[in-house]
Image (cartoon, rainbow, N blue to C red):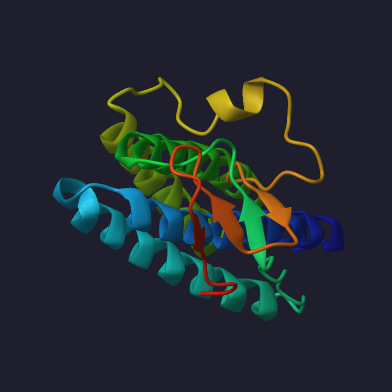
Amino acid sequence: MSEEARQAEVTALQAALAAEHAAVYGYGVVGGRIGERRRTEARTAYDAHRARRDALVHAVRDLGAAPVAASAAYELPFPVGDGAAAVRLAARLEERLAGVYSDLVRAATGTRRADAAGALREAAVRAVRWSGESVAFPGLAERSGARTDERTGAAGTTPSATASITSGTSGTSATAPARH
């Protein structure tokens, strides 16, 4: 593998890792607001993202790089004050992850490419389950528009200095854990 190809793979792995950090955080919020009927689905997704995050940490280290750390907290793309908003957030997280994993599929080779393709498929399936809508080429729709800027996480969250999330409807706040 050339140094250029290795660096492209590390960059894509780091982006996927950052997105998984944000997804783990986001699913913590989802789990606190989701209705009882879909709580098991949210917990399953949370566990899957924690496992993916841990695997990505190992993959980045295997390539000799230091894994990107999770932010202490993330600013959500919209207020999540009830179950309906939690479902929308879960769908958004998965859609954004599909985009990041499509980049990793392009940058990786061999087993890592196969793993990235599996992660892309899983994110696309979860996005459809949460939103009830699908796209022809999951992961590519997210890349067709404007790319997220440097401050916005790939999973649709923005790193924040605070761990407090204020509900848009009740005025109460829920504290999310800093790291998972």
In-image side of 41 versus 75 (left or right): left
In-image side of 145 versus 79 (left or right): right
Q: Residue at x 22, y 47 (%)?
A: 35
Q: Nearer the viewer, residue 157 or 98?
A: 157
Q: In the image, is residue 32 above or below residue 83?
A: below
Q: Nearer the viewer, residue 43 or 170?
A: 170
Q: Nearer the viewer, residue 49 or 39?
A: 39
Q: In the image, is residue 45 above or below residue 134?
A: below
Residue at the left extreme of this rendering: 37
In percent of width and height, residue 174 lies at 48, 60
* Location of residue 170 (image quadrant): top left
Answer whether residue 108 is visible to the viewer in this image: no
In percent of width and height, residue 133 lies at 32, 22
In-image side of 166 versus 66 (left or right): left
Q: Nearer the viewer, residue 96 or 83?
A: 83
* Location of residue 179 (image quadrant): bottom right
Q: Residue at x 85, y 56 (%)?
A: 4
Q: Residue at x 54, y 24 (%)?
A: 141
Answer whether residue 92 is visible to the viewer in this image: yes
In percent of width and height, residue 173 lies at 51, 56
